[in-house]
Amino acid sequence: MKDTFIHKNAILGNNISVGNGVTIEHDVIIGNNTQIGNNVTILSGSRIGKNCQIHSNAVLGGIPQDLKYKGEYTLLEIGDNNIIREFVTINKGTISKGKTCIGNSNLIMSNAHIGHDCIIGNNCIIGNNCIIGNNCIIGFSVGIAGEVIVEDWANISGLTAIHQFSVIGEHAMISGLSRVVKDVPPYIVAAHEPLRFAGVNTVGLKRKGFNSDKIDELRAIYRVLFQEKRNTKFALESIAEKFQDTVERDKILNFVKSSKRGIIKGFEL
């Protein structure tokens, strides 16, 4: 392994593959069967699970790009079975949350950036060049600002930028070239500029085993929330009254009620 440096205090599991030009600092833990490509940098405070693929030139555990960071001890925690492609950067946490967390079985495509204190769920796809703050999943040139939360099964297309503190709901699909400055509720497609509701994520939900009746229920709920021109408080009261208790209905209600930034708007008819 030419020009590779692995600190003597780093803890590496079994059957780990390490390429040329890799740097692994002290206070790093890497699980079994993880593959590390050429010129990868893994900095102190990083915790990486098993069966991950980390491709060339990724930088994991870099210090936060946040002026409030004063060198305090923080972590980057990455779960199992993740694919992290070329030139991805993921920063560790700040004093705000103490760590950046990436769940299991995510695909983070080339050149994506995930900022400090983000929380990314499981089975997410982040497109190329996405920029995501904390807790997001990003594709090519996706950028996620700090303290973003991305819930399970979210799909964020390339060249998307996500504003700090935003929340992306589970099974949501965000179209490419999007600018996310409000929360995106679960189960929907978000598109256009400014970003707004563009329908239920029918294709994605069918792929995940949602049946037609459930998808029709979600359409009806979002029709009340986005298309009947009600204020949000009245729409939520109407949904709670008209629709039977289900996991999905309650997740939508709780997501909107707990939103601090407010949710995206409905489309214009």
Image (cartoon, rainbow, N blue to C red):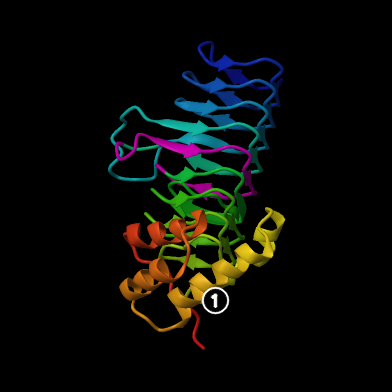
Residue at the far top: name it. 8
Q: Is residue 55 above or below residue 26?
A: below
Image quadrant in which you'd find residue 85:
top right
Q: Residues within 10 Å of mark 1 (few under 14, many from 20)?
A: some
Residue at the far bottom: name it. 269
Residue 110: x percent and y percent?
A: 64, 49
Residue 14: x percent and y percent?
A: 68, 15
212 left or right of 72 in image: right
**Which one is in front, 104 or 70?**
104
133 in the magenta segment: no
Q: Is residue 242 above or below residue 2?
A: below
Magenta stretch bounds: 95-117
**In the rendered image, is residue 268 in sight?**
yes
Residue 257: x percent and y percent?
A: 34, 61
132 left or right of 56 in image: left
The amino acid pointed to by label 1 is His
**In the rendered image, is residue 189 in sight?**
no
Image quadrant in which you'd find residue 74:
top left
The image quadrant where one finds the N terminus is: top right
Can you identify the residue that label 1 sits on? 192
Name the residue at 38% across, 48% down: 147
Name the residue at 58% across, 27% down: 49
Q: Is residue 38 above or below residue 164?
A: above
**Which one is in front, 211 or 19?**
211
**Which one is in front, 110 or 105?**
105
100 in the magenta segment: yes
Residue 209: x percent and y percent?
A: 69, 54
Name the residue at 47% across, 67% down: 243
